[in-house]
Image: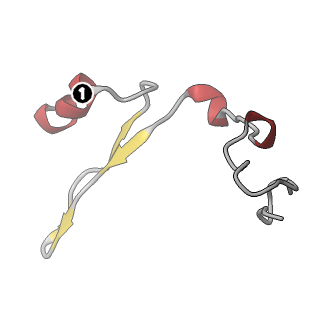
């Protein structure tokens, strides 16, 4: 039997681990996300940037460094 403290326990036979009947799909936070980016060094801290634009693609990620 496999399971986790906050998950569901599933009885399965050997070789059935990836069987669709044993998998529960989830979407956390409605599919949205946020990214936090900051820096620190010996002399202090830099600004903390919060990017709350949903999924972060390549263009959004690069703009963190440009702006």
Closest to the observer: 49 or 12? Answer: 12
What x and y, as percent, mark residue 19? 72, 39
Closest to the observer: 19 or 34? Answer: 19
Question: With respect to residue 16, does 27 lie above or below?
Answer: above
What x and y, as percent, mark residue 63? 19, 29
What x and y, as percent, mark residue 11? 88, 56
Please state the total of marks drawn on the protein image. Answer: 1
Q: Which residue is found at the position 81% from the left and 36% from the top?
A: 21
Closest to the observer: 43 or 4? Answer: 4
Q: Which residue is found at the position 43% from the left and 27% from the top?
A: 55
User: Which secondary structure, mark 1?
Assistant: helix
Colour setup of the view: secondary structure
Left or right: 39 in relation to 16 = left
Q: Which residue is found at the position 73% from the left and 48% from the top?
A: 16
In the picture of the structure, the residue carrying the numbered disc 1 is 58
- Which image quadrant is residue 28 in? top right
- Which image quadrant is residue 18 in? top right
Q: Which residue is found at the position 14% from the left and 76% from the top?
A: 42
Seen as rendered, the residue at the extreme front is 14
Q: Residues within 10 Å of mark 1 (few under 14, many from 20)?
A: few
What x and y, as percent, mark residue 33? 50, 34
């Amino acid at each position: 039997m496999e399971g986790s403290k906050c998950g569901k326990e599933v009885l399965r036979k050997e070789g059935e681990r990836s069987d669709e009947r044993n998998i529960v799909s989830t979407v956390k936070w409605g599919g949205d996300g946020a990214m936090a980016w900051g820096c620190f060094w010996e002399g202090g801290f830099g600004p903390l940037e919060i990017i709350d634009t949903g999924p972060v693609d390549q263009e959004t990620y690069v703009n963190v460094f440009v702006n």
